[in-house]
Amino acid sequence: MSRWIIQEDDGTSDGFWMAMAMFFMSVVLAVVGSIIAIFAAFCLVGIIWGTFMSLKNYISGAVLYPTSMGKTISYAWFSNVEQMQWFFDSARDYTHILPVLIKPFLVMAGVGVIFVGTVLFPAWIILHAALMILFSPFILVKATQSRH
């Protein structure tokens, strides 16, 4: 006949170490998540900034050439390319405070100017064409008045 000895373990030491491991894992994940969130925020702001710069370039072209869609589009496109190159050059040459965050911001601004600006180009062209059709009578009246 065999005898079984049952010894109950309350498991307090295992639970303590498990709780400590989970606590430290959550701290590490919170720190890493915060760093990723800050980096992603800088990248997102860069894309938004680049998009606004692209829109500004298109509006500048529309102001310079109000009656010529082709010249407006050419001006906006070449301004976008120039702006993108400026952002990329600035990112490459940046050596000041927080380069880990500022360089991606500048790169993403360049991406925003050229990529998002290019994707949104048709929308801006349609908006420009609609505004030209809406305001063309006023432009023609102004042009005829300035001749006399």
Image (spheres, helix red, strand yellow):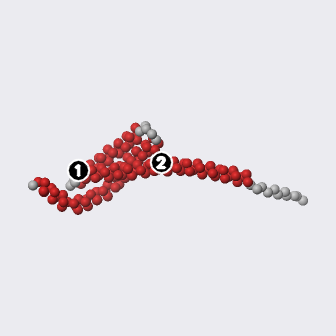
Q: Residue at x 32, y 52 (%)?
A: 55
Task: Determine if residue 69 is in view.
Answer: yes
Question: Where is 66 relative to 98, above or below?
Answer: below
Tell me: 62 left or right of 106: left
Is 12 displayed left or right of 51 in the figure? right
Residue that numbered label 2 is attached to: 39
Q: Position of residue 12 (x, y in %)?
A: 73, 54
> Position of 43 compared to 61: left or right?
right
- In the rendered image, the residue lying farthest to the right is 1
Q: Looking at the rendering, in which quadrant would you find the N terminus?
A: bottom right
Secondary element under disc 1, as helix, strand or loop, is helix
Q: Amino acid at mark 1?
A: Leu
What label does residue 130 carry, if any?
Answer: none
The reply to whether residue 115 is visible in this rendering is no
The crowding category of the residue bearing disc 2, from other C-alpha atoms within 10 Å (few below 14, some 14 to 19, many at least 20), is: some
Q: Earlier in the sequence, mark 1 or mark 2?
A: 2
Label 1 Cα neighbours within 10 Å, binned few <14 / some 14-19 / many ≥20: few
Where residue 6 appears, x then y in whole percent? 82, 57
The residue tagged 1 is: 64
